[in-house]
Amino acid sequence: MVNVLVVGSGGREHALSWKLSQSSKVETVFTAPGNGGTENNVPISVNDLDGLADFAKKNNCFTVVGPEDPLAAGIVDKFIQLGLKIFGPTKNAAQLESSKIWAKNFMKRNNIPTARFEIFDDPKKAQEYVESLDYNVVVKADGLAAGKGVIVCNSNDEAISAIQTILVKKTFGEAGNKIIIEERIDGIEASYIALSDGKIAIPMASSQDHKRIFDDDKGPNTGGMGAYSPTPIIDDALSKKIQERIIDKTIQAMTNEGIDFKGFLYAGIMIRDNEPFVLEYNVRMGDPECQPITMRMDFDLYDYFIASSEGKLSSMPPISWKNQYAVCVVLASEGYPEAYSKGEEIMGLDSNSNDSYVFHAGTKKSDGKILSNGGRVLGVTALGDTLEYAIKNAYDSVGKISWPHKYFRKDIGQKGIAYL
C-alpha cells in the first residue's frame, strides 16, 4: 500500500483524489493544499516545491500534479532528481502550455493542424497587422493566465482593444509580454485528452467544455462553467483523425526534439468541416472536464498513473468506461470571472449519491461549515443512461445547493443534445 499526494486545490484535484482513493493499492490520499471537500489536506502551496518534496518523501507518497503552475515551474524535474515518484510532464514538456508561442511554433514546424498566426510584443505593429486582415482573430497572451488569457474577437475594434488589454494595460501581467494574433476558426469546440508515457498515448473519454460565463456561449471566457462526457461531436472517425494527426504526432515530435512527454496531454480542438485544428495544448487534465471523465472511469486510475510515469503504458490492459453520460455543472460566485464575494456559507451539500457527486473547488472549511472561497466554487457532477437524463440528474442536485451569490449556467450539455 502506498500513499498519494495530489497537488492542487480545485475541482480537478478533488475529482482525482476521490478516484485515486478508490484504488485497492492506495492507503491514504493527501491533497496539498486541498479545499473544503478534500480529505487529509496538507497546508503546502502548489508553488512550494521544496515543501511538497519534503512531505512526499516523509510520507512515502506517489505524487500527482493537478494544475499547470507547478508543472511549468519544474516540480517533476525536482522530484525525479530527488528519486521521488511523480506523475506529470517535465518543465521542458510543459512548455506546450506555459508558452503559447512555443506551442504554436512547435505545431508549425511539425505540421500539426492549427490556425495561422503571428507573434507581437509591439502594440503599434500588432494593431497595424490586425488592420491589414480581412478575417476575425483571436488574441492570446503568451504565458499562463489561469485560462483567461484568450480574447475571441468579432471585429477589428475588438482585436485592437484586446491588444491594448494584454500588451499595454498588462491585465495578465508578465504572461502578456508577448501576444499571438491568430485566425479565428469558427466551428465546434471539444476537448481531447490522452494519457502518455512518452512512447504511446491512450485517449481518455471525449468531453466538451463550456468556457463562456453566460448561457448560449455569451460573455467573457472563464476557466470553464461545465462539461459533459462523452461528446457525440467526436465520433470514431474524428477521434481517429485527432489521435493520429494531433496526439500521436505531438508525442512523436516531442520525442524527436529530445523531450519525453509523460502525463496528460490535452488538446483543445476546433472542428471545422469535420477537420480538427488545435486551439491550444494543456499539459494536465482539464478542469471541469476531469469531473465527468473521472465519474465515468471504470478502471484503477492509480495503476495507469504509475504506468505513465514508468513508461509502461503499452503493457496495460485497455481502459474501460461506464456506458453512461456524465455532466458537470459548475456553481460559481456571482461576478466571476471579475470581482466576487467570498466567505458565504453553502447549504445542501449532503446530496451525493451513487449517480451524483459534488466536487469542491473554491471552498474552505471553517468551524464545521463549508464557505465559498473562490470564483468557481463547486462542480456538481451526475451520471445518466442518456445525456438528457445526466443533465436532469445534475441540475436536480444543483437545485438542492444554495448560498447567497450562487451563479451557474442553465444550458450545460445542451450542445450535445442539439448535435444528437
Image (cartoon, rainbow, N blue to C red):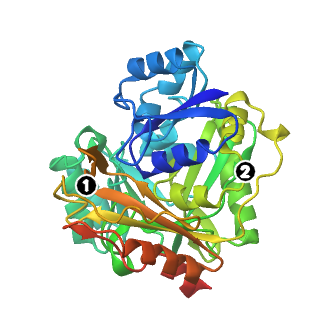
Specify whether 222 is left or right of 341. Answer: right
2 or 112, which lies in front?
A: 2
Which residue corresponds to the image point at 41% horizontal and 59% vertical from the top-left? 182
Which residue corresponds to the image point at 58% horizontal and 18% vertical from the top-left? 84
Residue 313 coordinates in the image, percent (x, y): 77, 39
Q: Which quarter of the picture shows residue 253?
A: top right
Specify whether 144 is left or right of 392. Answer: left
Specify whether 221 is left or right of 82. Answer: left
Q: Secondary structure at mark 2?
A: loop
Q: Quadrant of the N terminus?
A: top right
Residue 244 coordinates in the image, percent (x, y): 74, 55
Of pointers 1 and 2, the one earlier in the residue sequence: 2
Tell me the kind of residue under disc 2: Phe
Which of the labelled discs sits on residue 93, or is there none?
none
275 or 380, which lies in front?
A: 380
Residue 386 coordinates in the image, percent (x, y): 63, 80
Which residue corresponds to the image point at 72% horizontal and 38% vertical from the top-left? 303
Which residue corresponds to the image point at 44% horizontal and 35% vertical from the top-left? 40
Marks 1/2: CA distance? 32 Å
Q: Which residue is most to the front?
A: 368
Q: In the picture shown, does residue 237 fall above or below 77?
A: below
Q: Residues within 10 Å of mark 2 (few under 14, many from 20)?
A: some
Q: In the picture shown, does residue 309 fall above or below 128?
A: above
Tell me the kind of residue under disc 1: Ser
Q: In the picture shown, does residue 381 fall above or below 264?
A: below
Q: Quadrant of the C terminus?
A: bottom right
Which residue is label 1 attached to? 372
Camera sees residue 178: yes
Which residue is label 2 attached to? 299
